[in-house]
Amino acid sequence: MRYNVSQLLKEQSGGMREYSLHEEIGQIDPDIVALTTLDGDVRFIRTADGILVLGKLHTSVELMCSRCLERFSLPVQVALEEEFLPSIDILTGASLPVLPDQEQATMIDAHHILDLTEVVRQNILLAIPPSPVCRSKCAGLCPHCGKNWNEGPCECKEDNIDPRMQVLKQLLDQ
Ligand SMILES: [Zn+2]
Ligand SMILES: [Zn+2]
């Protein structure tokens, strides 16, 4: 996801490039298990200070359901809107001052390479819910026998009654 933007940096504000992405992202982050390539389109627009990146990308990641613990595939959409700033003046070759709030992820390097990897990685992580569920009505696991209730009821329905009632029941059974 590395683009040489030296030509675009020489253009006036409004200059534009468009690219289609089709990227393997298997190694992008230990917490991201990508099941498909990252696909979509990005647009680079020359601004007064740098390059505005707009993009709509999508992939699918494998997650573990927080209720039933089964692995499932979640489609992830990533909308990019980031301004990248050059670290070198394209015309003079002089180093440019780094702004205090400038993130490393959105710096164009000294060789005029604009790298989308870190911004994409952060956006995918943000798109992953903290407690993912495989489906909105996931029934989860039986807390007693561990059976996946999505596959049907378990044998221990009887034991699911309130523990206080359980004591009563035992007394009555004696
Ligand atoms: Zn589930
Ligand atoms: Zn059970």
Image (cartoon, grey):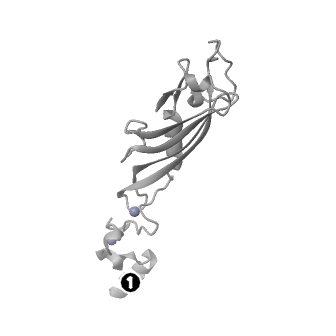
Residue 55, compared with residue 98, is above or below; it is below
- Which of the 4 quarters of the picture holds residue 22? top left
Residue 3, compared with residue 67, is above or below; it is above
Residue 140 horizontal/vertical position (percent): 40, 66
Residue 74, compared with residue 42, is above or below; it is below
Residue at the spot 46% in from the left edge and 40% down from the top edge: 20
Identify the image quadrant of the C terminus: bottom left
Q: Which residue is mark 1?
A: 169
Secondary structure state at the residue bearing disc 1: helix
Q: How many marks?
A: 1
- In the rendered structure, the answer to whether residue 33 lies left or right of residue 99 reads left
Q: Nearer the viewer, residue 65 or 160?
A: 65
Residue at the spot 41% in from the left edge and 50% down from the top edge: 60
Mark 1 neighbour density, 10 Å: few (under 14) some (14–19) many (20 or more): few
Q: Nearer the viewer, residue 99 or 145?
A: 99
Residue at the spot 56% in from the left edge and 30% down from the top edge: 105
- In the rendered structure, the answer to whether residue 119 lies left or right of residue 86 reads left
Is the CB of mark 1 within 8 Å of ligand 2? no
Give, as a three-letter code, the residue at label 1: Lys
Q: Nearer the viewer, residue 35 or 152?
A: 35
Q: Quadrant of ligand 2?
A: bottom left
Residue 32 horizontal/vertical position (percent): 42, 43
- Which of the 4 quarters of the picture holds residue 96? top right
- Quick check: can you spot residue 161? yes
- In the rendered structure, the answer to whether residue 156 lies left or right of residue 118 reads left
Residue 153 horizontal/vertical position (percent): 32, 75
Residue 16 horizontal/vertical position (percent): 59, 34
- In the rendered structure, the answer to whether residue 114 lies left or right of residue 66 reads right
Q: Nearer the viewer, residue 6 or 108?
A: 6
